[in-house]
Image (cartoon, helix red, strand yellow):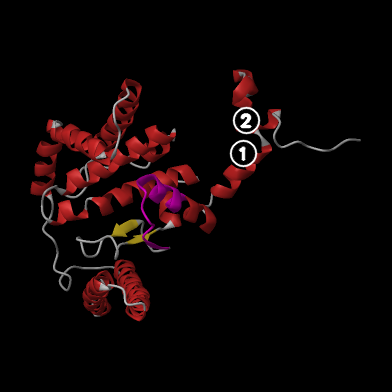
């Protein structure tokens, strides 16, 4: 009996619903190879995280930031005048809870975070609002998905049930601007228009500024936002305190690593008679952020949980 199996060939097992009928080129989606790839990606193992992050940075032509597996998925810009001290936290459990189970979707999520890095100085100097910052980042998800033929639906699904807040627009606006960016990129491409970073950023800002819902709803959300609680007076749970402690420790570890790395680079440049001003700047910035993180850690370690 011949029991050999060619994983590159179509097999009915991977059709799902055979009654729908699949033919021709669509067969490649249902090979054993694709099934095993999906099964491997489902839990977002470290190699999938690494390749997804790398592909997102490659899209922008950037060197990856320092990436670690933290307790939330976010980018920490640090000094807004440089990307050298930025760090990227990836929380696979948080991502999977939002339905992210494949490398392409994760890479689009990372694309959103990288866009925050690229606009950090605009945000720090008050040129864009919190909502504009989020929607610009969403725009880049749409641009990249269109440019590389990636599926935007799973990213959009992660916004399910998201309401307006002081810092983030709700589900409908975020979906609207991802789809708008996706469509605009494809239309510009069909027309043979130049598509570079500056062109696409101008498109993003124009579309966001032309959307009257953005300004009106952000103003209302900020008006209705509760006042920020005093850390010592607010009734924090132990779980919340622990999360803030872990985040502060992550920042401390990251900035220590930035200092160590740049001190080595600085020593090499001095030894070779090369300029080292950038390393000096990175070291100074990381030391500043390190002290902030230490104070933050001390604050949370001295915060008592609510016993009621």
Name the image quarter holding the C terminus: bottom left
**Residue nearest the viewer, comparing 301 with 154:** 154
Query: Gap between marks 2 and 1, in whole Å?
Result: 8 Å
Residue stretch in magenta: 52-68
Kindly identify which numbered label has been placed on residue 34: 1
> x%, y% of residue 211?
15, 31
Q: Secondary structure at mark 2?
A: helix
**Residue nearest the viewer, comparing 42 with 268:** 268
> x%, y% of residue 237?
28, 68
Report whether residue 101 is seen. Answer: no
> x%, y% of residue 206?
16, 33
Q: Mark 2–mark 1 contact, CB under 8 Å?
A: yes
Q: Secondary structure at mark 1?
A: helix
Report whether residue 186 is seen. Answer: yes
Which quarter of the picture shows residue 81?
bottom left
Write the residue at 52% across / 58% down: 46
**Residue nearest the viewer, comparing 67 with 45:** 67
């Amino acid at each position: 009996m011949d029991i050999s199996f060619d994983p590159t060939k179509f097999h009915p097992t991977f059709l799902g619903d055979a009654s729908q009928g699949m033919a021709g080129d669509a067969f490649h989606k249902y090979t054993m190879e694709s099934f095993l790839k999906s099964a491997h990606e489902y839990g977002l193992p470290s190699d999938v995280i690494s390749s997804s992050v790398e592909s997102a940075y490659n899209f922008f032509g950037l060197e990856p930031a320092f990436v670690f597996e933290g307790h939330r998925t976010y980018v920490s810009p640090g000094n807004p005048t440089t990307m050298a001290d930025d760090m990227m936290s990836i929380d696979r459990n948080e991502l999977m809870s939002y339905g992210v189970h494949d490398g392409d979707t994760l890479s689009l999520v990372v694309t959103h975070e990288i866009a925050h890095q690229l606009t950090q100085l605009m945000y720090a100097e008050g040129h864009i609002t919190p909502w504009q910052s989020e929607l610009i980042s969403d725009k880049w998800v749409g641009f990249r998905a269109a440019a590389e033929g990636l599926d935007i639906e799973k990213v959009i699904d992660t916004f399910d049930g998201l309401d307006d807040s002081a810092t983030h627009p709700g589900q409908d606006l975020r979906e609207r601007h991802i789809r708008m960016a996706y469509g605009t990129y494809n239309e510009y491409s069909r027309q043979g228009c130049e598509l570079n970073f500056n062109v696409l950023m101008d498109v993003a800002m124009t579309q966001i500024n032309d959307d009257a819902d953005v300004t009106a709803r952000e103003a209302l959300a900020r008006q209705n936002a509760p006042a920020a609680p005093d850390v010592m007076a607010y009734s924090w749970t132990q779980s919340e305190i622990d999360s803030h402690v872990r985040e502060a420790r992550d920042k401390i570890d990251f900035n220590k690593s930035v200092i160590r790395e740049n001190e080595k680079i600085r020593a090499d440049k001095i030894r070779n008679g090369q300029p080292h001003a950038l390393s000096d700047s990175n070291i100074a910035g990381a030391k500043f952020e390190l002290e902030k993180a230490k104070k933050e850690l001390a604050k949370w370690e001295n915060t008592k949980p609510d016993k009621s």
